[in-house]
Image (cartoon, helix red, strand yellow):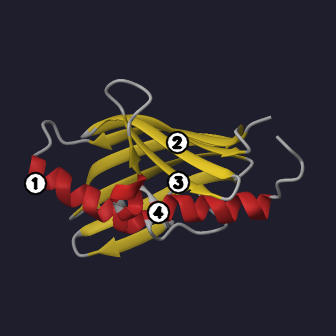
Amino acid sequence: MPTSISTADLTEFLLAAKLATYASQNAEANVAPLLPGSRQLEYHHGDFHYRDIYFGSAFFAGQETVYHDQTPLWTMVYAGGMLAEPAAPEMASQVYEFLRLALRQVEPQRPFRGPRRLQHGSFLYEDENDGDIERFSGRETISQDGLTVYQLRYTGGRID
């Protein structure tokens, strides 16, 4: 990774990118996917570029990558989704709406997913992780009325 890119600059860009893509449902972030069957979200600012490519819906897997001058700097891979089998479409819609609310609470000291804990109505979002922006792994869950209905695992960090 270019040594000229500080952790603070990377974190600032990553926070802006996350808020401008999936968490906000920004239609302008959707681009034609590079991979057949995937969905792709992108955000650009200056020499930074963020790309999130994922497959699936109720259960999904994907990868976020941050580039600077077309050089990959940071990545996060993730997989998870609804636990109820089969997940009722209206329930999945409510869970993912709540997930976007949680992801809009992303914090500079934990710029991976949402806050450690967020309660809203009958939903509870919890995120546990180890590490920092350099190297990390974690798990987020959403419960409704005490029953876990969604889970996602993630890992990533700076690319050497």
Question: Which of disc 1 and disc 4 is earlier in sequence?
Answer: 4
- Tell me the distance, in whole angstroms, between the alpha carbons under discs 2 and 3: 20 Å
Is 146 positioned to the left or the right of 29 in the image? Answer: left
Q: Quadrant of residue 95?
A: bottom left
Q: Please, what secondary structure does the residue beneath circle 1 have?
A: helix
Question: Which of disc 1 and disc 3 is earlier in sequence?
Answer: 3
Question: Which of disc 3 and disc 2 is earlier in sequence?
Answer: 3
Q: Is residue 143 above or below residue 69?
A: below
User: Measured from the top left, where is residue 11 in percent x and y?
Assistant: 69, 61
User: Measured from the top left, where is residue 36 in percent x and y?
Assistant: 35, 24
**Residue assigned mark 3:** 43
Quarter of the image with the C terminus is: top right
Is 147 positioned to the left or the right of 109 in the image? Answer: left
- Tell me the distance, in whole angstroms, between the alpha carbons under discs 3 and 4: 7 Å
User: Measured from the top left, where is residue 157 in percent x and y?
Assistant: 69, 43
Q: Please, what secondary structure does the residue beneath circle 4 have?
A: helix
Q: Quadrant of residue 53?
A: top left
Q: Amino acid at mark 2?
A: Tyr
The residue mark sitting in front, 2 or 3, is 3
- Tell me the distance, in whole angstroms, between the alpha carbons under discs 3 and 1: 29 Å
- Tally the numbered discs: 4
The residue mark sitting in front, 3 or 1, is 3
User: Measured from the top left, where is residue 120 in percent x and y?
Assistant: 29, 75
Judged from this view, the residue extending furthest toward the top is: 36
Q: Please, what secondary structure does the residue beneath circle 2 have?
A: strand
Tell me, for residue 20, which label it has, or none: 4
Tell me, for residue 90, which label it has, or none: 1
